[in-house]
């Protein structure tokens, strides 16, 4: 391995309010070996560069500007700039515990490990508590991730580590051609599922994926995300992301219309079942609404295929 044992990467787009705390949590890591911090400024127009320059006296810190907007693009840029074999991604609005890098680095002594991530707790805005209508399932959309207090090797892609607290072995990333730029957030569109796809690839190729509870990260919940409209929008884009992921896997076609329709009806039915429970009712309604996004993307895909013939 190179002298730098692990590279911490923050991809950021117009989050200067939170970015400083994220960087500071990395600068304060209790890690005996050498590490670096790469901040990828993904086309920010706020004070992002100034926030990084305020800490530029620390030799561990690197800054790179990536003008092409997109989380997967920024992640790939971070990997290219980083110098180590282990890449650890932290969101720009998250704060890592002081042993985060140490726990992640130690896990990669397992030569079969491709991906690892840890527990994520939520930091609520001052004076705000979790709304009554927010279910544990929807809290996961805010980044919450807790599979318990023991290390778990993931067998189902749906349980994959969250991207805000995520690490990957460089050789595996190169093996699959990097993060797929068809997935992952681009500006205000909330495309997702890139981590789920990565876990599918890893398991298919005989690699392992791990949940590490001691690699703890706390994620700030922005006040604007505590509106029902944000969750509906997130559900819509989740549906589109799932449709795209299936298309990339060669599962496009008429069958998507049947799957989406069945899931839409199931979501509405469950929303009615949980009518007396505001959190679960809204959870199931968001799921149903997401299937409209899925169906919309599936129809667009079919029309595009038809036009090419």
Image (cartoon, rainbow, N blue to C red):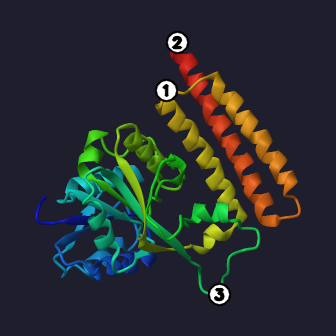
Residue 67 shows up from this direction? no
In the rendered structure, are the residues bearing label 3 and label 1 in contact, judged by CB atoms less than 8 Å apart? no
Q: Report how far apart the C-alphas of labels 3 and 2 lie in the structure.
A: 57 Å
Neighbour tally class for label 2: few under 14, some 14-19, many 20 plus, Cα within 10 Å: few
CA gap between label 2 and label 1 equals 17 Å
Q: In the rendered image of this protein, does residue 24 appear above or below residue 304?
A: below
The local secondary structure at tag 2 comes to loop
Residue receiving disc 3: 127
In which image quadrant can residue 240 be found?
top right
**In the figure, 28 relative to 119: above or below?**
below
Cβ atoms under marks 2 and 1 closer than 8 Å: no
For this orientation, the residue located farthest to the top is 309
Q: Residue furthest front?
A: 150
Q: Is mark 1 on a helix, strand or loop?
A: loop
Residue neighbourhood size for the residue with mark 3, other residues' Cα within 10 Å, grouped as few (<14), some (14–19), many (≥20) = few
Instruction: Depth check: give the residue in front, 127 or 172.
Output: 172
Residue 250 got which mark? Answer: 1
Q: Which of marks 3 and 2 is nearer the N terminus?
A: 3
Look at 45% across and 72% down and name the residue there: 93
Circle on res. 307: none
- Eye-nearest disc, 3 or 1: 1
- x 74%, y 34%: residue: 261
- In the rendered image, residue 299, in percent from the top left (x then y), is placed at 64, 29
Mark 2 against mark 1, which lies toward the viewer? 1
In the rendered structure, are the residues bearing label 3 and label 2 in contact, judged by CB atoms less than 8 Å apart?
no
Considering only vertical position in the picture, is 172 above or below 163? above
> Label 2, on which residue?
309
Q: Report how far apart the C-alphas of labels 3 and 1 lie in the structure.
A: 47 Å
Mark 1, residues whose alpha carbon is within 10 Å: few (<14), some, or many (≥20)?
few
Measured from the top left, where is residue 192 in percent x and y?
A: 51, 50
């Amino acid at each position: 391995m190179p002298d730098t044992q692990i590279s911490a990467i923050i991809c950021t787009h117009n989050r200067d309010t939170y970015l400083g705390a994220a960087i500071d949590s990395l600068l304060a890591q209790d890690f005996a070996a050498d590490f670096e911090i790469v901040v990828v400024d993904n086309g920010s127009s706020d004070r992002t560069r100034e926030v990084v320059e305020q800490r530029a006296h620390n030799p561990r810190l690197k800054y790179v500007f990536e003008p092409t907007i997109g989380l997967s693009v920024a992640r790939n840029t971070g990997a290219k700039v980083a110098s180590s074999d282990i890449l650890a991604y932290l969101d720009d609005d998250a704060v890592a515990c002081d042993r985060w890098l140490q726990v992640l680095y130690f896990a990669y002594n397992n030569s079969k490990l491709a991906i690892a991530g840890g527990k994520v707790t939520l930091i609520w805005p001052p004076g705000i508590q979790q709304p009554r209508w927010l279910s544990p399932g929807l809290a996961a959309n805010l980044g919450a991730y807790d599979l318990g207090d023991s290390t778990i090797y993931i067998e189902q892609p749906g349980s994959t580590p969250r991207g805000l607290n995520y690490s990957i072995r460089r050789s595996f990333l190169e093996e699959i051609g990097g993060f797929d730029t068809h997935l992952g957030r681009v500006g205000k569109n909330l495309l997702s599922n890139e981590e789920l796809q990565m876990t599918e690839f890893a398991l298919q190729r005989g690699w392992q994926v791990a949940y590490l509870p001691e690699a703890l990260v706390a994620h700030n919940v922005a006040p604007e995300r505590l509106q029902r409209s944000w969750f509906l929008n997130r559900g819509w884009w989740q549906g589109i992301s799932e449709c795209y992921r299936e298309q990339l896997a060669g599962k496009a076609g008429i069958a998507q219309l049947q799957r989406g329709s069945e899931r839409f009806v199931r979501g509405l039915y469950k929303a009615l079942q949980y009518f007396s429970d505001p959190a679960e009712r809204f959870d199931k309604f968001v799921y149903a609404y997401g299937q409209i996004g899925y169906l919309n993307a599936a129809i667009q895909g079919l029309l595009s295929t038809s036009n090419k013939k």
